[in-house]
C-alpha cells in the first residue's frame, strides 16, 4: 500500500470521525461506568482468591449486640476485649470505631491498650472544617498517647458509589497522614509510622515499595473466594465470642480488625462482586492487599488514550481501504478478540487498562468505515452500473481496486454495421434519437441477463457478464442476451420501416476468458473497465461478423462454457490480429428449450 493511498481523502475523513467518536467514548460517563462494572467482573473471575490467613475481622454483629447490649458500648467493653485476647498473642488490633468524644471509661481503655503487649491502631477521619476544607479529627488525647499508631478511615468512592480504591495517604497542611491500613501495615512490618517514606507515586515501608497512583491510592484486591457459585465472606467472628478467653482460639501473629457487623450500624458500603461490605472488612481487605503485595495496577490515562488513538488510526488509515463489509467485520471481531484476551490476561497478572472504550472504538470504526465505503462505492459505481447493482456491490471490494483483479467473465461487443453511411443520410439529431431508442432496448436486455455496459463508443457497446456481480453461468447469459438482441432489433426494424425511418444491422462478438476488471484512469476521469486478451478477442470477433455473414460470433471457450443450452454451428477458423494461430469460431443458430441451472 502506497503512502498516498493511506492518506487519501476518505481515509482522512474516516480517521477524523473515528478520532472524534473515540474521544467522546473515552470521556462518556456511560462508558466509564460500564468499564467499572467490567472491572468488577474481572476482579471476581480472575483475582480475589488469594488470602493472607493471618488477617481476621472481629464483627460487632447482632449476636454481639444481643449479648452485650445496644451500641454504642461503654469503652470498658473494648478494654475487656484487649484483656481477653492478649494472652492469645495477636500481632495487631486495629479498630474501625471512632473515639473522638471523651468518655468516663477512657482511662480503663487507655490502660488496656498500654498493657496489651501488642500494637493497637486507632482510626480518625477528616471532618468538615469549612465549606471547602476538611481537617483531621483525631481520637481523644488519652487514647492517642498509648496507641501504637493512628490512621484515617476515609474512602474513595467511584461514580457508581462503589469502593474500589484505597487512599493510603493524605497531605494536609504540609504533613502527610497515613491511612488506618497503611499505619497497620507499617506496624505489622515493625516500621514506625513516622518512618514511612512518601515518594512520587510510591510509598516505602521498610524494604517494601508500594506503587500507587499520584494521589497515593491503590486498587483493593478484594478477597472474593467462591464455594460453588456463592461468594464467601472475609473470615470474621462475633465480638462477644472473644470476651471469654476460654472460647478464644490461638491468635499468634494474627491481625484483627474490629468494626460494625450489622446493617443498623450504617457502616456497610457497595464493593465489587459481593454487593455490600462492612467498613472493618473493607479495611481488612486493604491490609490483606498490602501484605500480599500482588495487587492490580491501574494504567494511566495516557496509556488508555494511546490505545484508542492507535485503534482509531488503524481503522481510519488502513482498514478504511477494506470495502468488503464481511471481511471488515471479521477483522473487527478478530481485533476485538485479541484485545479482550490480552486485557484479561494482563488483568489476571495485575495490570488494568480499559476494556470497554477500545471495544467502542472498534465498533465505531467498523460502522464509520462501512458507511463511508457504502457511499463511496455508490458514488463511484453509480457512474457505471445500475443502482440495484451498486446495492449488491457495497459488500465487495474486488472491483474497486485501481489496476483491478483478474477473473473469468464473458465479454460481448456489439457494433452497428454501416454506421458511417447511416450518419451521412440522417441529421445528427435523428441519428441520436435512433441510437437512444436502440440502446434503450439493448440495455433492458443486458440488465435482464445481468450484463453490465462498461463502455459506449457511439454505435458500439462493450458489455461484461459475470462482473461486477458474479454469475457462474455468465457465458449462457451473454449468449442469451445476444440472441435476444437479434430478435429485438428485428422488431425495431419493422417499427422503423412503418415510421419510414432508416434502419441498420448489428454484429455481436462474444468471448469467455480471464480479464482484468477494475477502475482505470485518473481522478476526475475514472472508468470501470475490463481489459486483456479476452476483451480484444471479443472486439475482433464482432468485426468478423459481417465477413462471416452472421450477426453473432462466439469463441470456442464460450461454446464450451454454454454446453448444450444453444444449438451451435461452426463458422470455421479465422485469423485474428494479435493471434499466432487461427481460431475456430461459432454462431448461435437457435435457443434450445431449457434454462440455465
Image (cartoon, rainbow, N blue to C red):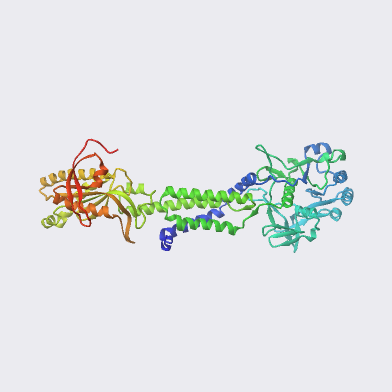
Does 314 sit above or below residue 395? below
Quadrant showing the N terminus:
bottom left
As rendered, which of 116 and 437 lies closer to the eye? 116
The reply to whether residue 455 is visible in this rendering is no
Q: Please tell me whether residue 3 is drawn above or below residue 381 in the rendered image.
A: below
Question: Where, quadrant-wise, is the C terminus in this rendering?
Answer: top left
- What x and y, as percent, mark residue 552? 18, 47
Front residue of 336/437: it is: 336
Left or right of 36? Residue 94 is right
Q: Residue at x 25, y 40 (%)?
A: 563
Q: How many marks?
A: 0
- The answer to which image quadrant residue 427 occupies is bottom left
- Locate residue 385 relative to residue 253 in the image: left or right: left
Q: Tell me where residue 368 appears, x and y as whole percent.
A: 45, 52
Q: Is residue 215 something one can see in this rendering? A: yes
Q: Give the residue at the far front of this rendering.
A: 581
The image quadrant that residue 137 belongs to is bottom right
Q: Position of residue 396 (x, y in %)?
A: 38, 49
Which residue lies at the image location 70% right of the left edge and 60% below the top edge?
202
Q: Give left or right: position of 144 versus 394.
A: right
Q: Position of residue 370 (x, y in %)?
A: 43, 51
Q: Quadrant of residue 170?
A: bottom right
The one nearer the camera, 47 or 163, is: 47
Amino acid at each position: 500500500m502506497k503512502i498516498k493511498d493511506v492518506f487519501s481523502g476518505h481515509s482522512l475523513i474516516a480517521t477524523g470521525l473515528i478520532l472524534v467518536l473515540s474521544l467522546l467514548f473515552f470521556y462518556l460517563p456511560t462508558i466509564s461506568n460500564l468499564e467499572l462494572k467490567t472491572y468488577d467482573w474481572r476482579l471476581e473471575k480472575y483475582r480475589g482468591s488469594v488470602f493472607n490467613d493471618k488477617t481476621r475481622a472481629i464483627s460487632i454483629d447482632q449476636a454481639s449486640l444481643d449479648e452485650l447490649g445496644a451500641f454504642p458500648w461503654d469503652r470498658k467493653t473494648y478494654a475487656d476485649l484487649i484483656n481477653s485476647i492478649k494472652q492469645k498473642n495477636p500481632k495487631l488490633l486495629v479498630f474501625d470505631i471512632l473515639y473522638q468524644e471523651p468518655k468516663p471509661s477512657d482511662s480503663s481503655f487507655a490502660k488496656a491498650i498500654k498493657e496489651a503487649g501488642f500494637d493497637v491502631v486507632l482510626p480518625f477521619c477528616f471532618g468538615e472544617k469549612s465549606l471547602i476544607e476538611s481537617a483531621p479529627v483525631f481520637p481523644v488525647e488519652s487514647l492517642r498517647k498509648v496507641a501504637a499508631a493512628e490512621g484515617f478511615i476515609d474512602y474513595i468512592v467511584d461514580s457508581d458509589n462503589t469502593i474500589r480504591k484505597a487512599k493510603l495517604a493524605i497531605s494536609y497542611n504540609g504533613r502527610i497522614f497515613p491511612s488506618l491500613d497503611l499505619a497497620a501495615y507499617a506496624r505489622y512490618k515493625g516500621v514506625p509510622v513516622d518512618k514511612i517514606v512518601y515518594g512520587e507515586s510510591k510509598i516505602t515501608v521498610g524494604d517494601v515499595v508500594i506503587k500507587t497512583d499520584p494521589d497515593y491510592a491503590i486498587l483493593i484486591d478484594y478477597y472474593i473466594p467462591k464455594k460453588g457459585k456463592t461468594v464467601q465472606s472475609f473470615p470474621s467472628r462475633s465480638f462477644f465470642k472473644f470476651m471469654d478467653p476460654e472460647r478464644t482460639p490461638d491468635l499468634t501473629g494474627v491481625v484483627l480488625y474490629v468494626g460494625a457487623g450489622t446493617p443498623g450500624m450504617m457502616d456497610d458500603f457497595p464493593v465489587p462482586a459481593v454487593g455490600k461490605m462492612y467498613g472493618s472488612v473493607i479495611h481488612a481487605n486493604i491490609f490483606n492487599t498490602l501484605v500480599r503485595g500482588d495487587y492490580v495496577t491501574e494504567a494511566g490515562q495516557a496509556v488508555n488514550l494511546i490505545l484508542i488513538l492507535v485503534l482509531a488510526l488503524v481503522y481510519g488509515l488502513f482498514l478504511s481501504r477494506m470495502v468488503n463489509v464481511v471481511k471488515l467485520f471479521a477483522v473487527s471481531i478478530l481485533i476485538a478478540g485479541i484485545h479482550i484476551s490480552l486485557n484479561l490476561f494482563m488483568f489476571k497478572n495485575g495490570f488494568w487498562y480499559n476494556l470497554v472504550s477500545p471495544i467502542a472504538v472498534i465498533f465505531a470504526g467498523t460502522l464509520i468505515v462501512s458507511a463511508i465505503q457504502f457511499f463511496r462505492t455508490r458514488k463511484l459505481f453509480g457512474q457505471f452500473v445500475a443502482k440495484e447493482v451498486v446495492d449488491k456491490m457495497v459488500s465487495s471490494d474486488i472491483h474497486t481496486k485501481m489496476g483491478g483483479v483478474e477473473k473469468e467473465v464473458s465479454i460481448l461487443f456489439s457494433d452497428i454495421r454501416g454506421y458511417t453511411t447511416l450518419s451521412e443520410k440522417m441529421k445528427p439529431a435523428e441519428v441520436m434519437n435512433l441510437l437512444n431508442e436502440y440502446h434503450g432496448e439493448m440495455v433492458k436486455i443486458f440488465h435482464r441477463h445481468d450484463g453490465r455496459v462498461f463502455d459506449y463508443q457511439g454505435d458500439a457497446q462493450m458489455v461484461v457478464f459475470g462482473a461486477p456481480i458474479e454469475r457462474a453461468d455468465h457465458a449462457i447469459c451473454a449468449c442469451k442476451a445476444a440472441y435476444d438482441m437479434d430478435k429485438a432489433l428485428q422488431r425495431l426494424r419493422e417499427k422503423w420501416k412503418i415510421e419510414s425511418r432508416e434502419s441498420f444491422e448489428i454484429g455481436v462478438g462474444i468471448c469467455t476468458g480471464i480479464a482484468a476488471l477494475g477502475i482505470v484512469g485518473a481522478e476526475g476521469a475514472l472508468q470501470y473497465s475490463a481489459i486483456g486478451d479476452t476483451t480484444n478477442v471479443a472486439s475482433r470477433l464482432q468485426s468478423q461478423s459481417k465477413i462471416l455473414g452472421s450477426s453473432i460470433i462466439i469463441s470456442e471457450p464460450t461454446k464450451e462454457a454454454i454446453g448444450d443450452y444453444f444449438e451451435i454451428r461452426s463458422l470455421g477458423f479465422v485469423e485474428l490480429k494479435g493471434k499466432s494461430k487461427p481460431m475456430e469460431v461459432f454462431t448461435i443458430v437457435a435457443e434450445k428449450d431449457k434454462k440455465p441451472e
